[in-house]
Image: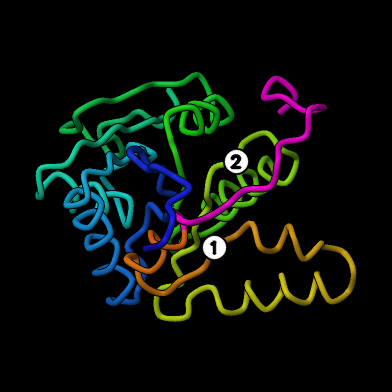
Amino acid sequence: MEENYNIIENVAVFCASSDGVDPEIFKMARIVGEVLAKRDIRLIYGGSKLGLMGQVAAGVMENGGFVTGVIPEFLKTKEVVHTELDRLITTKDMHERKLTMNELSDAFITLPGGYGTLEELFEIVTWSQLGLHRKPIGLLNINGFYDDLLSMLKNMTAKGLLKEENLEILLVADSIEELLKLMHNYKARPVPKWMNKNQT
């Protein structure tokens, strides 16, 4: 029996607020929510009813799960915000939103997305690299969406600009079940004593 290092009860999901044009990605976003709900893992996400974000939330709610949305004040419009969530937290700006999602979550999963999704992913990975948290970070590579990004990260390591141990912070799988298994069994490096969350 494999040893579980991490109890994951709340997971933050980063993903697009657009539908995209790949039906496999769109379908999988809803399945991610369904799997989380069936495993009694509560969803923490950006609070939008649109795109892949809305699909993940719908997958959780349709299967009796609990959803917390975290949205900055300037995005809290009727066209964007999901009004049927179990809990909605409003923050003053994007940075407070990310800090709040970090504090509420035991782990992070990134689905396909654009600039905003990548910014969220790389900030939370950087915080881990700096020792600000020890939580598992997963990348769900649906339909090869992140193949080019993963190739670039490996090239950064090959060129000596990214340490192998920091490359390994990012856990990658093409199914949500495999990704959750990797995240449950992730063993983080010790946290340096010279950093704390007030330095973000």
Screen quadrant of the C terminus = top right
Q: Is residue 158 above or below residue 34?
A: below
Does dot 2 land on a helix, a strand or a loop?
loop
Q: Give the percent coordinates (x, y) of residue 31.
A: 22, 63
Image side of residue 129 versus residue 87, left or right:
right
**Which of these two is toward me, 42 or 182?**
182
| Residue closest to the far front | 1
Which residue type carries mark 2?
Arg
Name the kind of residue labelled 1 in the image.
Leu
Residue farthest along the right direction in this orientation: 160
Residue 41 in which image quadrant: top left
User: What residue is shown with label 1?
Assistant: 171
**Dot 1 lies on which element?**
strand
Q: Which residues are magenta?
A: 183-200
Q: Write the residue at 69% across / 47% down.
A: 189
| Secondary structure, magenta segment, majority class | loop
Asked if the residue under mark 2 is in contact with the one under mark 1, i.e. CB atoms within 8 Å, the reply is no
| Residue 197 forms part of the magenta stretch | yes
Is residue 150 rendered magenta in the image?
A: no
How far across and down, in percent of the image, does residue 106 sit?
Answer: 44, 38
Q: Which mark is residue 134?
A: 2
